[in-house]
Each structure stands twice: as C-alpha cells, then as structure tokens.
Image (tube, grey):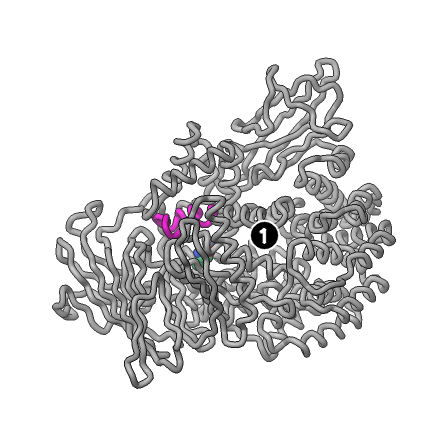
Amino acid sequence: PRTIRLDEYRPSDFLIDTVELDVRLDPTATRVTARLAIRPNPEGRADAALTLVGDGLNLVAASIDGADLRPDDLDVSPDQLKLANPPRGPFELTITTIVDPSANTRLMGLYRSNGAYCTQCEAEGFRRITYFLDRPDVLAVYTTRIEGSKAENPVLLSNGNLAETGDLGDDRHFAVWHDPHPKPSYLFALVAGDLGVVEDEFVTMSGREVALKVFVEHGKEDRATHAMESIKASMRWDEQAFGREYDLDVFMVVAVSYFNMGAMENKGLNVFNDKYVLASPETATDGDYANIEAIIAHEYFHNWTGNRITCRDWFQLCLKEGLTVFRDQEFTSDMRSRPVKRIQDVRNLRSIQFAEDAGPLAHAVRPNAYAEINNFYTPTIYEKGAEVIRMLKTWIGGDAFRAGMDLYFERHDGQACTIEQFIACFAEVSGRDFAQFLRWYAQAGTPVVTIRTTHDAEAKTFTIEATQKTPATPGQPSKQPMVIPLALGLVGQDGDDLPLVVDGAPAGPVFALTDETTRIVFEDIATRPAASLFRNFSAPVKVVSDVTDEELLFLAAHDRDPFNRWQATQTVALRKLVADVAAFRAVRPISPEPKLAEAIGRAFDPAETDCAYAAQIAALPAEGDVAREIGENVDPDAIHAVRSLLKADIRDRLAGPLAAAADRLAETGPYSPDAASAGRRALKYAALDLLSAGGAAEGVERVFALYKSARNMTDKVMALHALSIHATPEREEALTDFATLYSRDPLLLDKWFVIQASAPLPDTLDRVEALMAAPGFDMRNPNRVRSLIGAFGSGNPTQFNRADGRGYAFIAGVVAELNTLNPQVAARLLGAFRTWRSLEPERRARAETALRALAAMPDLSPDVADIVNRALG
Ligand code: B3K
Ligand code: ZN
C-alpha cells in the first residue's frame, strides 16, 4: 500500500456542503442513493478532476444536476468514481450504490450485528457505503432517510434530530434524520433493528431539554441504567469543567455485539461495543462499571473535541484522541479517586505505551507518514497524547490551560484543525513559546531522565542534575531535548516538604527541563532531603535516579504526594525484581527484602481507609514492567518465577495482617459498584492474591470459599482469576462451575475465556486451541477473539513466549485466518509482537520465524502487512 505523508497534505479540490442519503435496507442488497451538493474549493486547484473514493463499491447509477451520466462520462471502479471534467461551479451529483451488509465481516461501513444494521465509518468506512470525499476536512450537513421492513427494523436511527417518520404500508416504513452540524463523513452513523430502549432526559445549563436514549437488545434494558447515569454525569461535568453544552435535541447510545473497538462518537448517535454499555451486579464487575462510565464519558466528550472541532487530516488524530482521553481521565478523577485514577493511568501507560515506544512499532504522537491509518489508533496517539496535554497544563498552569481551551472552542468551532492551531491558542493565552514543546508531537520514544543529587552540608545546598536522552526509534536516529516539566518536592526528616529556594527566591514546584542537562541548586537545605521527583508523574518519562532505597521507603511513608508514595514502593520493588532476575538466571541466591514487605504491609493496616489506593500499593509491578526495565535478553519465565517468589516472601512476612484484611473486607451488604465499595473489594483481592501466592493451600482454600459464596460478579470473577493461576483441583472445579452457570451469556463467556487464556500454566495454549472449537466461540465476533486469543497474546507473558515458539506460531496462524475476515482485528492481535526484539536470542529467533512466515503470505491485507513490515523493519 501507498504511504501517505503529512507534508503532502493538500486541501480538497472540491467541497460537499450537503448530503442527502436515501437508504433502502435489505440484508444483502441495500440501496444507497446519495445526493451531494458539490462546489469547487476556492483553496483547491482550479481545473482539477473530481475523484470520489470508494471501497469495494458497486455503482448502479449516477447523474449530475438530474442528467444521467453514461459509463463513458465516468471513470468508475469499486475503489473510485472519477469525473475528469466536472462543472466548475456548484452542482448536484447523485450516486446510487448497492451494498451487501450481510457479507461485511470487516465490520467497517454498513454491516449486520445479530440481525441489526449498523455502521462504523471511522476512519475510512463511509467509502464502503457510497463514493465520497472521505476525508475529515470535508464537512457537510447530512439528511438521512432510512426505509426498511417495519417488523425487522422498528427502530431506524441516524445522526441529528428526527425530522419525519412515515408508514409506507406493506410492512415498510421510513424515518428522516437531519443533523444541522456540518461534519466529516467518518462521523456518519445509521442503526436499524428491533431494539429495546431505555429513556431519560437531561436539561442543559442553558435550559435546553435533551432526550436521552440507550438502545440495547430486547431483554437487556435493565442492564442499561448505569450507562444512562454515566451519560447524565458526563453532560453535567462537561458543562462544569469546560463550559461545553450539548447541541442536539436527542443523544443516543446503541449497544451492538459485533464491534471492532470500544465505541464510536458518531454525532448524536454513539455506537458502542455492548461490553461497554451493559452492566448489572449479576453480570458485570467493578472494572466493567468503571470502564462503562469512562467510555461513555469519552465518546460524549468527543462531541466538542472531535465533532464540533475535528481533525484536518488523520495525522492530527491525537488532536481529538489525546485531548479526549485527557478529558475522560479528568472526569473519572472527579467522579472517583484522583490519585487512584492517576496510578491506574500511569500503570496502563507504562505497560502499553512505553512498551510500544521501546519497540519496532514506536511512532510519534503525530506521525508524519502512515501506510494504514487503522493501525494508528494506538496507545501513543491516545495515552501519550493525553500525557502531552497534561504536561501542557502542568507547564502553563490550570487557569491558562482553561483560557486556552476556551479560545480553542471559540476560534475553531465548526473547523477541521491541526495540532499547530490547537497549540497556538495556548501560546496566545500564556505568552509562552511552544516551539520546543511541539517536539512532544514529533519525536517518538520515551525520554530517559537521569537524576543525580548532591547535598553540600557546608554550603547548605542540594543540587539536582537532570540529564535527558530520548532513545533512537525507527526512522528517528537522533533526538533533540524536550520541554520536560519536573514537579518535585524535597522532603525533610520530619516528613514535611522543605521550602524550595533557588537564587535566593521561592521557586517551583514545577521546573521545566529544557536542555540536555539542567542543574537546579536549592538553597538553605541543612540536611540531605529525600527528593520526591516527578510528582503526580509530571512527565511521561523513564526516571533513573540515585535516590536510595532507604530514601524511597521513607517517601513511601511520608511523601505528601500520593502518587509518589505509591511510586516509591514500586521503584524499590522493581529494582529488587530486576536484581533477583539476574541472580535467578545466574543461579545465585535471592536476597530477602523485609523492608519492602513492611511498606506493602501498610496497605493492609486496619487504619488505612482508602482501600482503592491501598490496593495499588499492594500490587507489585507487572511482569511486563520488569521485562521493560531489563530491556534486552528478556526471559519471561525467569521474571515470572522471581515475581512469584517475591509474592510468596511477602505473604510469609505478612500472613497475619493479610488474613485479617481478607476477613475484615468480606462483603456484607448488597452489592454497590461505587468507588469506595469497589476499593474494598480490590484490597480484599490483593490480600487473597498474596495469600494464595505459589498455590499455597490455605490461600487457595480461602479463594475457593469466596468463589462459592460470591453474590456478585466481581467477587466471582476475581476469585476465579486468583484460582486460575495455580494448577489445583479447585481451579478446575470453579472453571467448570462458571461455564455451567454463565457460558450462555456472551459477555460472561468472554470473562471465562480471558481467565483461561491468561493463566501462566503450561497447558494454557492447548486449552485455548480447544476452546476455539467449543460452542460460543466465533471467529467473526471481535469480543470473542480478543477475549480468547488477544488475552493469550498480550496478557500472558510466559505462555505467549513459550520457549518452543508455539505461542508465536499460534498467534500468527490466527492472524493469517483473520487477515481476510477482519483485517483490523487481525492487525490488533499482532500487537502481541511489539516487544519481540527485546527477548533472549532463542525466543527472538522463534518470534521472527513466525513473523516472516506471515510476511511471506500472499494477499496480506494492508492492515496486517503494515504491522508485520514494521515489526520486522
Ligand atoms: N474514535 C473511535 C475510534 C475509531 C477507530 C477506528 N479504527 C473511538 C474513540 O476513540 O473514541
Ligand atoms: Zn476517542
């Protein structure tokens, strides 16, 4: 496939002001007539041809201003419709195409999900419905008429407000929707089917009444209330936090069971993976409740950051995604615990984005070239993109940030924008020069900041010397220094922060590191303080510091920054795990670590009231964190073994408090998914996870008892997960029981798949292969594939990286099968290979063999070919 480059951007030669769609639904031959009001773009080339793109389309008829076009007036193929010499003034082009939604297994464009019709157009799905200028900088007003069978599709939905409905007799009816807000084609949506609905209402801050509707499969209406509450909370929050009001008469969410990703922010008609809508205490976990709230919010917030102001081109994807992730993170922080949310986000950033940044798929937050845009919906665009916004806010301060956002909304409403236009708003309100800051968008790779600290007792100074280096990434051999906001505190022996004085004046607490090396000399510091660096994770960097384990353990107890209290324990644990892996591989003894156990033990102190936070303290760094820290010649089995030993050591030291906590935190009243209750459950699992470390009989018994007595899905799933890690009879009994009870509900079947696919046990791959043939598994359903195969590839470090290479061959085999069926899902599965180069040589060779076999396959989809080529690149 052709590589698209940012510097080749040209405005469209034509614009489309209005689109009138007439869609006649039919399971295999849906007829789409598009009436397009087209005019030359004054910013385009004067005598350009008009080229509309298609993707696998079948043209039935075309006319200009009512006059039929004959085949030789046109240059038509399934992939384009070209008029060499279109009118040079405004004209109306009418195009009729026939599409087959039932044959659409790629789930892009118009397709069927369990009998309903639905669409997915981002990034380039609209061209699978009709020929179009399918690019985000062509904004049009859409009117959509949908006609179909009344019995099969009583519900007919599209973007905007409902303008008209009518009965045509003979089981036919229609609905007309009008969306007054000009939008790019990727935000178009259509849904039709026999769906249940939950309704509510929201009154906006200016008094506008908005009807709220959540559509689900019949019989699942009672699982839609949490989603509905989340919509209202999101609407209220966006008014309060950003002054943003909703702008249509109706806001709709539809849950579908076949969906390539999480959800889609189509204007006024968000389409969701049902996994992120449906919840009840009997069917959903605390994690599901939290995800639904966050994803509903994310899609809703896109109404302003993405829809009202959209992207000029797909290179600007982070303009809407990074910003909207930042907004949903802030929402969750306000709804739940801010420190816990920050810790979870940073764990997630490190495990997926740092891993991507350190491997062959590394790319900039704003890439400058792509072969397949679908492969750029990545942790770098989303999560690192959000960190860049957060740094910007940390750097210029909260008030200037809000003023910049206000200016952005005011100045660019209704436009398709670039990162430069966005940043210019903040430069203007803050008076700062953003030239260097913009490198965050251009340079890939995670900067490493090395910090050396020195205390001069005589001069009473404490010096921090920070050196930054961003490693080379594909296509970017050398890097320039970034603007890195370093938020810090110097903690004195009494545990309080010391005043920060630089050059005789109060300074900080945020310091911008702009050079390769920055020295900051703090004055009036009589004794060496403990340096609390990058408080609240003030920059997405990897920190290497000479702060000692003793100082870190002191910070773990005293730092007033909750993030760094957590980070301190994590850093000590990570250093130990890395040292232990080296010892283990060299067959040297592993040293005990009583102080770490003591720090973790504080999480289980009955006096600790913030359980969700305590649960974060209690959870050790993940195996992937250790692998990344080691960086090369990685042996996943050694990491797993050493981490399990550390857990068992901690358990032995804390056995009493762990058992007491598990008892104290046992569920008493009815289930409530609120953050405090969820936090108590999380801490209980942390205790049980440690108690059952190494498959210890007493701990396993406790977990099994919880499994059997559980009265909500969170307890059931967490107990099943804890049991599934060890090869015990209880494990098998519980897995069989769960299947008997729940395997008819696809979303619960998915939980059962994930748990089995992620077990670090030698027979896991055999089981996964067997489950693929079991009832309920469906290669065409992305949720099933991700739960069984995706969890194995990306959530099971020891078994995916089996020494015999079978894990690699297995994933490559599934990718080969999905390559034509659903290339996007296939390409996503390949993400499992994002760190293959850091493996020890034998595994690395086996991973490479699997990737090369894929690369040699004929007819690779652009999606898969792009990932394979870059992974091997
Ligand atoms: N914008 C969509 C993602 C579309 C992915 C297309 N391959 C969901 C979101 O980020 O909110
Ligand atoms: Zn998004």
In the shown orientation, is residue 86 left or right of residue 703? left
Q: Can the viewer see residue 761 in this picture? A: no
Task: Judge by depth and name the residue closer to the eye, 350 or 79.
Answer: 350
Amino acid at the residue labelled 1: Thr
Task: Judge by depth and name the residue closer to the eye, 732 or 322.
Answer: 322
Q: Please provide percent x and percent y for residue 690.
A: 79, 56
Question: Against 45, is 66 above or below?
Answer: below
In the shown orientation, is residue 761 left or right of residue 118? right
Numbered disc 1: secondary structure: loop
Task: Specify whether residue 320 is painted magenta.
Answer: yes
Q: Please provide percent x and percent y for residue 714.
A: 68, 64
* Residue at screen point 57% across, 29% down: 510
For the magenta stretch, what is the residue range? 305-323
Quadrant location of residue 425? top left
Q: Please provide percent x and percent y for residue 823.
A: 45, 65
* Residue at screen point 27% across, 70% down: 22
In the shown orientation, is residue 609 left or right of residue 827? right
Q: Name the residue under label 1.
A: 835
Q: Circle 1: is it few (<14), some (14-19), or many (20+) Cα within 10 Å?
A: many
* Residue at screen point 37% across, 72% down: 156
Q: Can the viewer see residue 629 in this picture? A: yes
Task: Judge by depth and name the residue closer to the eye, 468 or 668.
Answer: 668
Task: Judge by depth and name the residue closer to the eye, 388 or 681.
Answer: 681
In the shown orientation, is residue 308 left or right of residue 81? right
Task: Specify whether residue 420 is painted magenta.
Answer: no
Q: In which quarter of the image is the N terminus?
A: bottom left
Within 8 Å of ligand 1, the CB of disc 1? no
Image quarter where ligand 1 lies:
bottom left
